[in-house]
Amino acid sequence: MNTNIDVLGIGNAIMDVIAPVGDQVLSAENITKGGMTLIDEPRALHLHKVLKISAKNPVEVAGGSGANTIAGIAALGVSAAYIGKVANDRLGARFTKSLQAGGVSADTVPLKNGAATARCLIAVTPDGERSMSTFLGANTSFGPKDIDPDTVRAARVTYMEGYLFDTQDQKAAFVKAAEIAAAAGRQVSLTLSDAFCVDRHRAAFRQLVDNHVDTLFANEAELLSLCETENLNAAFGFLKKTGTIACVTRSEKGSVIIENGEAHTVKAVPVDKVVDTTGAGDQYAAGVLAGRALGLSWPDAGHLGSLCAAEVISHYGARPETSIHKLAIG
């Protein structure tokens, strides 16, 4: 079967509400700074109102970590598709249309008579740190039935978002997608998403990485948690044994890409001012995956990932606003 999709993303379909606020709002509303906290629907509605009142210019955009990466890939001119779960409501329709408008193929059947479409309330403080309160909504109904085998077979790489790897049905969906991809001779990529996710599901993540993942994306803290070590070199050793290629981000230190036992150090691209770190890891992954689809070496793909990350932290929002081609030339 011929491939006509370079990268297929599977992840949480979430509408993001991005609100610049002061640290006092975090304190007053008991929001954990720099963290990602799962909340229920009443809490989501309350915080949504608070952020609207507290922020001068809150922005509402289609988001979710995996969707942000896929949108970034499409923006780089690489063919992309997305599988995620939205409700049959206004926010769900807006989410799907937003991806489609960016050139992403997104045709998942909406959930009827269930939870509402998910939303992530992102409080961005003056230091650029983002603090997320997330209502998962319709995503909690995601399962194996949502994996379309033909779409997976048509994708050169299936990229799976760790935030979605939570319920037993969601885990089963990841394994189903990975097995279909492997049987078709395709590649499987996974992002660990958050150390919190790894801490909750370490054994299942380890099994997934050991048996199904060709390329792993993680930041340093997530990788150390996965390998249960405080030594980065020891973690790299674990990955070398599994044969997994790893792209490990280290904030201002750049990233390290482990390929066939060799470590490629990729420098961070400097920015004049960090405005909002939302989506930095997502766009790094977008640059790397797009770079590989375009035939770049791993180090060059890593540099493209650094360019994409630098662009996104220079403004509010988790998706690119400036052509990476222009940044690369500049």
Image (tube, helix red, strand yellow):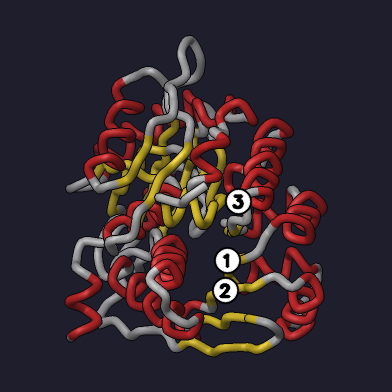
Q: Earlier in the sequence, mark 2 or mark 1?
A: 1
Q: Which residue carries the number 2 mark?
A: 247
Q: Secondary structure at mark 1?
A: strand
112 sits left or right of 294 in the view: right
Q: Which mark is residue 162?
A: 3
Q: Which mark is residue 217?
A: 1
The residue located at (56%, 29%) in the rendering is 146
Is residue 241 placed above or below 61 in the rendered structure? below
Question: Count of labels shown?
Answer: 3
Q: Mark 2: few, some, or many residues within 10 Å (few <14, many ≥20)? A: many
Q: Give the quadrant of residue 213.
A: bottom right
Q: Earlier in the sequence, mark 2 or mark 3?
A: 3
The residue located at (32%, 35%) in the rendering is 95
Q: Mark 3: few, some, or many residues within 10 Å (few <14, many ≥20)? A: many
The residue located at (31%, 66%) in the rendering is 312
Q: Earlier in the sequence, mark 1 or mark 3?
A: 3
Q: Give the quadrant of residue 101.
A: top left
Is residue 271 placed above or below 22 in the rendered structure? below
| Marks 2 and 1, how far apart at CA | 5 Å
Discs 2, 1 touching: Cβ within 8 Å: yes
316 sits left or right of 172 in the view: left
Q: Secondary structure at mark 2?
A: strand
Give the residue type at disc 1. Answer: Phe
Is residue 39 or residue 160 the one in the foreground? 160
| Marks 1 and 3, how far apart at CA | 10 Å
Report x, y in % for residue 162.
60, 51
